[in-house]
Amino acid sequence: MGDTDLMLTRHRLNVNEYHRMAEAGILGDDDRVELIDGSLFDRPPISQGHAGVVNALNRALVLACGDRAIVSIQTPAQLDWFSEPRPDATRFRPRAEQ
C-alpha cells in the first residue's frame, strides 16, 4: 500500500462535542486543553514567571478599564462553533443591567 492509498480525514470537534467530552469524564478538571479550529491542543503548565506576568497584566487591565469593562483571566472564550480557547486575559464589555 503506497502513501497515496491511505486517505485520513480529520474529524473537527465542535464546542458542544468538546463540552460533552468533559461531562462524560473523557476530559477531567485537571486536563489543560483548549479547542482551536476543531482540534484539541494541550496547554503547557503555568510557570512562576508566566503567572507573574498574567497577574501584572490583570492588575494593569483592571486599573485601566475601571467599570467600563470586565477583565477575565484564563477563562474559556467561545469564538465560534469550533474554537474555545482559554486566553491569558480577556476584556469584555459589561452587559446592560436587566
Image: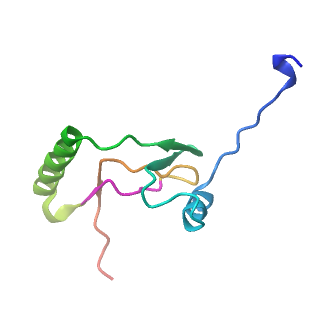
Going by the picture, which residue comes out furthest to the top? 2
Of all residues, the one furthest to the bottom in this rendering is 98
Could you tell me residue 79's position as x and y percent? 48, 52
Where residue 31 appears, as percent x and y from the top left, is: 46, 53
Residue 62 vs 88, above or below: the answer is below
> Which residue range is magenta in the image?
71-78
Main secondary-structure element of the magenta-colored stretch = loop
**Drawn side of residue 56 relative to residue 6, left or right:** left
Q: Residue at image x 47%, y 56%?
A: 78
Return the x and y of residue 73 as percentages of the image width and height: 28, 55
- Location of the N terminus by quadrant is top right
In depth, the one of 23 and 70 nearer the eye is 23
Residue 4 falls in image quadrant: top right
On whether residue 3 falls in the magenta region, the answer is: no
* 31 left or right, relative to 9: left
Where's the C terminus, which quadrant?
bottom left
Q: Which colour scheme is used?
A: rainbow
- Residue most toward the left? 63
Q: Does the magenta stretch include residue 73?
A: yes
- Residue at 60% of width from left, 64% of height from top? 20
At x 81%, y 29%, the residue is: 7
Q: Where is residue 45 in the image (x, y as percent from the top left)?
A: 34, 43
- Up the image or down, 7 lies above or below 3; here it is below
Instruction: Identify the image quadrant of residue 62.
Output: bottom left
Residue sitting at x 23%, y 61%: 69
